[in-house]
Amino acid sequence: MTVDWKQETEKRKAAYVEDLKALLAVESVRDDSQATPDAPLGPGPTAALVKMLAIAERDGFTTKNIDNIVGYIEIGPKDADEYVAILSHVDVMPAGEGWDTEPFEPVVTDDKIIARGASDDKGPGMSAYYAFKILSDLKVPLKRRVRLIFGTDEENDWTGMTRYFEVEPEPVFGFSPDAEYPIINGEKGNVQVIIKGEATNGGTVKLVDFESGLRTNMVPGIARATVKSSHAEKIVTEFQEFLVENPKVSGSTETDGEIIKFVLNGKQVHGAMPETGENAGTYLANFLQDFDFGGTAKSFLTYLGTPAHDDTVGEKFGVKYTDDVMGPLSMNVGIQKFIDGGEAFINFNFRYPKGITPDEIVAGLSSKLNGWDVTPTIGGHSQAPHYVAPSDPIVETLLRVYHDQTGLPAHDQVIGGGTYGRLMKRGVAYGALFPDSPDTMHQVNEFALLDDLYRSISIYAQAIAEITNLD
């Protein structure tokens, strides 16, 4: 059966944008404080899942909602024993501060759509859905069933997709439209290391509070701290000098007697690429660490401000490592908090290749504590490195489809980001970001280029038609 995939996409562009706008308008950020039995991760993620499945039901597709935390849309022969999976997600990162538009009121311009989730991952997920529509509308013959599965917690602990694989059979293979082209057939391991202890003071300068970071997989773009000192004016003057010496960041202060409130602005980016951002928290700690703090406030600031600062490869902790195939280890200090009389807390996120272990990473972090009485521990959602050989037919097929549709070079690659693709033994990530497109995932003013999303509809439709018929 011969199909002009690009022409079929052209017919559906306007409808695609309207459906995507409706999905983007749902503020689907996980919020455990509002969790209920009907919305286990808070109302937003559940509402987005229900919205996506309702769009599919409107169009006559078979759907299933599992516990309001994961759901799927299915096409293909119902009597087929095997199925292929396309894994996407409808949850998004917190918007953060500094947007030029409202993050959950989508703005469509001549060339882009601007909203939280436009690029990660509602836009690409909707492209995969419209690929389903083309295949269904044209009755393209499929050897296997195909499921487009939507999780609701990809940006945190993968709760929804974990539940899916507990109650549903495994797919034979598939892809996740949640990264970049030409393909991602390798993903580094992903581990969080947590440090927490008592928050105390004891010097002539007091750290009242310190906060930076929204999620472990985001480079913090803003840091705030409250400090008490009898030499407030001197500290403010030195902060202004620090900002001049560090032009990659900016900041401001407010004083009220002995109280100084600091704000430092860095650059928020995806935690998988910390080298492209500027960690506001470690910069602020780097400035504060030399003042006369005592107690654990001194240890907290020194740890953040020296070994953890200005190092995205773990060199100062002795864990710098590069694998010939998977590339280098990366390190992000994602969450940093201190509340006097309460808790001091640091959350690291490492993306690591095969050849180094989480235990070795923990040992490296422990080696620089310098008397701070805390114990780094592995926490959160950890994942081992994942790799599918370039010779696997799914990799070869997806690369050929990409080249056929774009004329661009097609090659395999490994990333530090973690996608649902790794949940399948023969799973990869595939788009929807093109090599020459700006990457705004996890950033303020997130957007996706409309042409990229349209091209992905066409690519996904052909790709699904071909991989579902592989032997």
Image: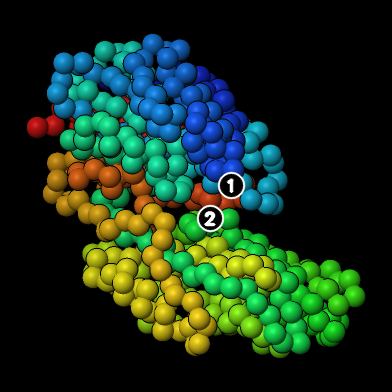
Q: Is residue 134 above or below residue 111?
A: above
From the viewer's perspective, is 94 left or right of 427? right
Question: Which label number is shown at residue 215?
Answer: 2
* Residue 93 spot, x, y in % from top left: 54, 46
From the viewer's perspective, is 283 left or right of 275? right
The quarter of the rendered structure image containing the C terminus is top left
Label 2 close to label 1 by CB (< 8 Å): yes
Q: Is residue 349 above or below residue 406?
A: below
Amino acid type, callout 1: Pro
Q: Nearer the viewer, residue 121 or 362?
A: 362
Asked whether the viewer can see residue 323, the reply is no
Quarter where residue 61 is shown:
top left
* Residue 450 spot, x, y in % from top left: 51, 34
Which label's residue is closer to the chain start, 2 or 1? 1
How far apart are the alpha carbons under marks 2 and 1? 8 Å
Q: Secondary structure at mark 2?
A: loop
Give the residue number, with chain letter if any, for mark 1: 94
Q: Nearer the viewer, residue 342 or 210?
A: 342
